Amino acid sequence: MQDKHKEFEKEMLPHMSALYNFALRMTGDPDDAKDLVQETYMKAYRFFDKYSQGTNAKAWLFRIMKNSYINRYRRESKEPDKVDYDEIKDFYATVKGSVADTNDLQEKIFGNLFEDEVAKALQDLPEEFRTVVILCDIEGYTYEEIADFIEIPIGTVRSRLHRGRKMLRESLRRYALQRGYRDLNNEAD
Amino acid sequence: MDCRESQELMSGAVDNELRGDQAAEFFEHIEICSGCRDEFELENLTKTYIRRMITMVDVPHDLQQSILLQIETSEKRGLTYGFWSSLVSNKFFQPFLAFGFVALIAVALFILNKSNTLIQSEKSWPLTSPQATNLDALSAAEDNFQHVLTGTLRPEITSTAISDVLTYVKEKAGYSINLPLIPKVDWVGAAITDGDNRPIAHVIYKMGETYIYIFAFPEKYLDARVVKLPLGCIKSISGDNWYWTHDSNGDLQAVWAHDGNICVATANIERNELVSLLSSKEYHR
């Protein structure tokens, strides 16, 4: 039993940060994230003999967590009915020449949003898009790793990222406008 | 490359995940197409913005401690837990071992069952009556389970006694199935659908918010192509193992073969709970 303990700690505990951050962005709540990580590790321990040493421990843990997440937070996730992707693109086309710096450009488009507003926008993404955006843009995994974690083809990772980011930037833009930032398009002239 | 193709590759270009030739074609395209170029830049901008705004946070300092502690306590909790979990996690664990357990309790309950009530429901079930051929058991079970959860499908009979359900199935479907005797059910119910003279039994257990729905049919339906299952599933269950999967709603599905019948259970609980409920002492028919 002692050996199992040691082996488990060595193989599994180093991935806690990746799992916790993923859980946090998926649930949007630190306590829920802790619960989810805890549940994942308990299951991993219970089924540790099913895990073949030397294979990808992180992917194995992610898969356990994904199932736990789905079981707990099963909810209808739908793409927004109608999103005007072109509004922001047109806006971008008009402002991009006026600033050189990326940060300024981001600020022009998304305003001065706070971190929690960005987190909220991320959280409102339908689950399948949120998952890939978190894994790619926040945690920095490659497409191959993501495909392995959530068991989808690489082509699907790619298309979900594209659509996910589209939806996300649209909702960030809406947040920015809602917060009272005037359409900077007008200010530009 | 046209705009449609460039859209498909766009995130790959942003993330530096394109093959050399794909990348070359993509960047060639956005040289000449300002629409795609703007979109590429915007996607890039969105990605860097998210990365800048949402940073990785530190794991709460007590989390690791509390996980290790919980593992320790669960281990100390004693033999019963360890026994069950080792049984469950043993890959050679055969579902039929779970049945044939504790006949005495079954007999005792059989006597108690006499006092239970049998409710005959007027609701009709055959909303999802099986097609005559090649009904996909897993997705049929998934659909039916959703109807069960929303209450649009109700069993033809419900009772607090599993013996009533077994009798009902035997009389109406013409074959017997073995069912786990799950303690503390609110009710257990059954319905029989008859696709082309090949009846299929549906059994539902309700325990509070937990539902287990079992779709049961004789093995020979597979050969006769009345019902189909994925190949991997058939392999698994013919070796007397459980087969596990999640349906598209995230509900857990378990398939096993026993005594000439195949059962597909769908439930809104997790695997360890489902295993321990399905492994409840069997009721001897």
Image (spheres, coloured by chain):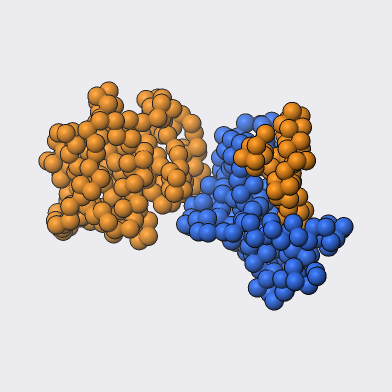
Q: Is residue B200 visible?
A: yes
> Above or below — where is B103 with respect to B208?
above
Residue at figure coordinates x 66%, y 52% from the top left = A165
Outermost residue to the left: B171
Q: Is residue B61 visible?
A: no
Coordinates of residue B200 in the picture (x, y in percent): 22, 38
In the image, A35 versus B4, the foreground residue is B4
Coordinates of residue B91 in the picture (x, y in percent): 48, 31
- Say which quarter of the image contains residue B202: top left
In the image, B228 versus B74, the foreground residue is B228
- Say which quarter of the image contains residue B229: top left
Q: Quadrant of the C terminus of chain A?
A: bottom right
Coordinates of residue B275 in the picture (x, y in percent): 42, 43
- Say which quarter of the image contains residue B266: top left
Colour applied to chain A: blue
Colour applied to chain B: orange
Outermost residue to the bottom: A180
Residue at figure coordinates x 62%, y 51% from the top left = A164
Relative side of A113 to B264, left or right: right
Coordinates of residue B198 in the picture (x, y in percent): 18, 33
Residue at figure coordinates x 77%, y 32% from the top left = B24
Residue at figure coordinates x 44%, y 27% from the top left = B232
Outermost residue to the right: A100
Relative side of B267 to B122, left or right: right
> Above or below — where is A185 with respect to A49?
below
In the image, A139 versus A3, the foreground residue is A139
Q: Quadrant of the N terminus of chain A?
A: top right
In the image, B217 versus B25, the foreground residue is B25
